[in-house]
Image (cartoon, helix red, strand yellow):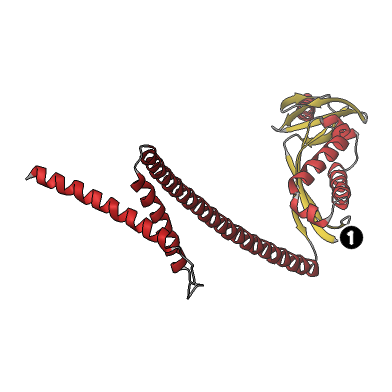
Amino acid sequence: MSGFEVTALVVVGFAAVVIWSGAKMVPQGYNWTVERFGKYTRTLTPGLNIIVPFIDGIGHRQNMMEQVLDIPPQEVISSDNAQVTTDAVCFFQLQDAVQASYEVNDLYRAMQNLVMTNIRAVLGSMELDEMLSNRDRINVALLNKVDEATDPWGIKCTRIEIRDISPPRDLVDAMARQMKAEREKRAQILEAEGEREAAIKVAEGQKQSEILKAEGALEAAKREAEGRERLAQAEAEATRMVSEAIDKGNSQAINYFVAQRYVDALGQLAESSNNKVMMIPLEASSVIGSIAGIAEISKGLGGNAGGVLKGEA
């Protein structure tokens, strides 16, 4: 080979090396920063990019896809002095490759420590029961704090999830005993409420029974009063008829009326359980006259009946 051919091969090889060093293929989901003499100049996006060989260089290769950062377990003391062990997982995505490259050193270590300190701050402000029962509220509080802190780094935190909160064994046993006591207490309360409801139902039943008995007694009293009223009306009617007979001059009616009252009074005295022997002074003429009046009325009634029978015959 001549000297010209060697020179040509060297030039072609040098040109190939220059072209190869100036052409950069950026993968999908990544952004690369370009530095010229150590100073940032521009960002390379996915695809084929050309830089100035030997002058421009690749500074940082940043992953722009959503990433997962594991937070190692750590011990946290709650506001009521309960010690628990907790770990978490953080999901984040780079929004600005330049800020993520030049605003923070060792991005992943900074994110990990930031999440751990905020976990201690949020959980340390809660009591143990609140810590165990409000997992969603803890996640939201952590996300807001960490996302605000990482905004200058060009990072967007999408989710922070507490994976586990583990109290010590003796504390777990104490919580189990407390839960058992609470359940027994609720059972006793429910049993007492059931007995109270049963007693109320029984009292209401007795009340209704007494009301029905009173209503029955009231109805019986009304019926009895109506019976006495009708009896009084009948007696008043009989008295009126006797009075009319007296007004017409019939003396037998008054004798019958007096005799009936006299006999009724004697019957009531005889029926009394307290009197075994009665000493009653009577005027024989009054009694005989009354009985004679009754006899005359009976004869009159009999005569009328006989006349009626003869007329029919």
Residue 76 placement (x, y as % from top left): 86, 57
Q: Quadrant of residue 61?
A: top right
Q: Residue at x 49, y 67 (%)?
A: 281
**Image-based side of 83 in relation to 246, left or right:** right
Q: Residue at x 79, y 56 (%)?
A: 129
**Image-based side of 288 in relation to 44, left or right:** left
Q: Quadrant of residue 292?
A: bottom left
Residue 32 placement (x, y as % from top left): 80, 31
Q: Amino acid at mark 1?
A: Asn
Q: Determine which residue is flagged by label 1.
A: 81
Q: Visible in this render: residue 1? A: no
Q: Residue at x 19, y 49 (%)?
A: 303
Residue 128 placement (x, y as % from top left): 82, 57
* Position of the N terminus by quadrant: top right
Secondary structure state at the residue bearing disc 1: loop
Q: Residue at x 77, y 51 (%)?
A: 88
Say if 192 sits above or below 162 in the image: below
Q: Farthest residue toward the left?
A: 313
* Position of the C terminus by quadrant: top left
How many C-alpha atoms fall within 10 Å of the one at disc 1: few (<14), some, or many (≥20)? Answer: few
